[in-house]
Amino acid sequence: MKKKYIIAIDGPVGSGKSTIARMVAKRLNYIYVDTGAMYRALTLKALQTKTSMDDPQKLVELAQTADIKFKSENNILKVLLDSNDVTTQIRDPHVTRNVVHVANIPELRGIMVERQRTLGKKGGVVVEGRDIATVVFPKAQRKFFLDASFEERLERRYKELISEGKNISKEDLAEDIKIRDISDKQRKVGALKQAKDAIYLDTTGLNIDEVIEKVLSYV
Ligand code: DC
């Protein structure tokens, strides 16, 4: 029987990691864990409960009690927050803009990291995020750092949002991505960086199938 690896995939916004992680998990019959969705779900809960984004202690309390679960339906990952399906809501631009406040709190990240470890500890998982290979699973059997040029990342995100019916200008999106890149890289705990032993894949100019084949060739 095939060994059940932990496959860690990190990368910036628009590097293709969510699509690649989901498809690689499908090909290997592994579980896909989208850690960004966990920070997003928590942000949504903070907004719904009108918890101040300037009150780290309250946000930590929220993280302690929030019930965040994943459910796979026809290869679509559903995100459940306190038993409610929030898969679409957590992609709302308002959530995206506020997630930085939640993701920057070290104590809150500690709670999320523990949950992510619980989800992945048995192996047979593809876990995707910013700090997976460096913090969550530093001993993962396979580690990838996906990247692409800024222009291509912008173009991918733009197409994705337009196809979801979101109304956003490319200029505003470019600003949003720049801000998220800076906050991802400068976060005091769990910052986005390539693990020393991670395989760097520049996906600029590659299509999804080409990247999947590259990742699988290392697995
Ligand atoms: O991958 P994403 O865009 O859905 O992630 C949403 C936010 O969560 C992103 O702004 C960075 C943050 N995040 C994080 O801090 N650590 C992770 N492991 C995953 C995401």
Image: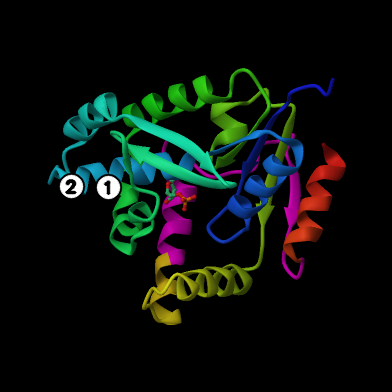
- Residue occupied by mark 1: 44
Residue 134 in the image, given as x and y percentages of width and height: 59, 32
Residue 20 in the image, given as x and y percentages of width and height: 67, 51
Residue type (three-letter) at the residue carrying disc 2: Gln
- Check disc 1 and report its element: helix, strand or loop: helix
Badge 2 crowding class, 10 Å Cα cut-off, few under 14, some 14 to 19, many 20 or more, is few
From this view, report whether residue 145 is shown above or below residue 82: below
Quadrant (top left, top right, bottom left, bottom right) of the C terminus:
top right
Image point 59% across, 47% down: which residue?
75
Q: Is residue 203 left or right of residue 161?
A: right
Residue 31 in the image, given as x and y percentages of width and height: 62, 33
Residue type (three-letter) at the residue carrying disc 1: Leu
The image quadrant that residue 32 belongs to is top right
Would residue 16 be visible to someone looking at this image?
A: yes
Quadrant (top left, top right, bottom left, bottom right) of the N terminus:
top right
Q: In this view, does 69 lie to the left or right of 56?
A: right
Image point 63% across, 72% down: which residue?
152
From this view, report whether residue 163 is shown above or below residue 146: below
Numbered range of the magenta stretch: 177-206
Image point 45% across, 69% down: which residue?
164
From this view, report whether residue 156 is shown above or below residue 142: below
- Residue occupied by mark 2: 48
Q: Check if residue 181 falls in the magenta segment.
A: yes
Q: In this view, does 114 lie to the left or right of 140?
A: left
The image quadrant that residue 8 belongs to is top right
Residue 12 in the image, given as x and y percentages of width and height: 56, 54
Would residue 190 be visible to someone looking at this image?
A: no
Q: Mark 1 and 2 residues: CB-CB less than 8 Å, in contact?
A: yes
